[in-house]
Image (cartoon, helix red, strand yellow):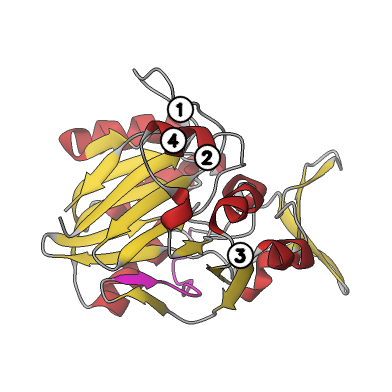
Amino acid sequence: MEFKATVLCENYVINQEGPIAEHGWAVYLETKEGNYLFDTGQGKAIINNALYFHKDLSSIKGIILSHNHYDHSGGLLKILDLTGTIDVFSHPDLFKHSYDIKENGTETYNGIPFCREVLENRGANFIFNRGAVKITPKIILSGEISRKTDFEKGDENLFIKTKSGIMQDPFLDDQTLFIDTKEGLIIILGCAHAGIINIINYAIEKMGQSHISAIIGGTHLGRADKDTIKKTIQALKNYHIDKIGVSHCTGLEASLELYQEFRDHFFFCNVGQIIER
């Protein structure tokens, strides 16, 4: 086994008794260099599901956060109770003030639910990055993703509050994992706030490999307009992707359209799904 990824947190549980679902995302990574956790879900399912799938969270060498939203960072405190002092890889914008603001003015805080001091007192050793970081010889944390497509414009309802006022969140902190395997690249998304096509192009450029064995995770197409979904699917057809496993924030409409286009290359990447190479 080169690499094994097991989904511990996701919106759906299918045909399994024991694990539970939540609106969130977390993936347990097993490598020859040790085990890691990519995102932590909301915190309601991570411990239960890790126990069910026999994944020892106390043994992991590091925690990697794709971005600051509560459904990816909310389980961090509970995991620190198991690990003690541990490296936490993240963009320096982890503690930005993030909000979901609707057209009617209703706003909901959706950032990380803990302050830095609490997490550090519990054992988090934050390693902040803007550029790419090598987690293991074969696993790269992307750093900031270049934005080059003209149709991946981000979610217009997601904002940050700064000293200068309220602005649309640019999601500079949106990070992805790139895994180099003998069968091709594996790309593990968080929510793909940078745009899945931007991410794929960046991965190919950064890793020097164009064949994609699998791409899994949230695509954030669930809140995209029809034109963006159409252009994204059209662009995806230009790549060599063996398997596309959608999760979390992809949405049912976009998932259906992806299935209709990619058929045998498509799957739902829900709780308990394993990617192994």
Within-10-Å neighbours for mark 1: few <14, some 14–19, many 20+: some
| Nearest to N terminus: mark 3 or mark 2 | 2
Q: Is residue 34 left or right of residue 166?
A: left
Q: Nearer the viewer, mark 1 or mark 2?
A: 2
Decide: few, some or many residues near mark 4? Use Cα within 10 Å; few <14, some 14-19, many ≥20.
Answer: some
Give the CA separation, mark 1 to mark 4.
Answer: 18 Å
Badge 2 is on which residue?
A: 46
- Look at mark 3 in the image and give the residue it sits on: 171
Q: Which residue is mark 1?
A: 12
The percent coordinates of residue 76 (x first, y second) are 61, 53
Q: Nearer the viewer, mark 1 or mark 4?
A: 4
Q: Say if mark 1 contacts mark 2, CB within 8 Å.
A: no
Visible residue check, residue 7: yes
Looking at the image, can residue 231 be seen? Answer: no
Q: Is residue 121 left or right of residue 258?
A: right
The stretch of residues the image draws in magenta is 139-151
Q: Earlier in the sequence, mark 1 or mark 4?
A: 1
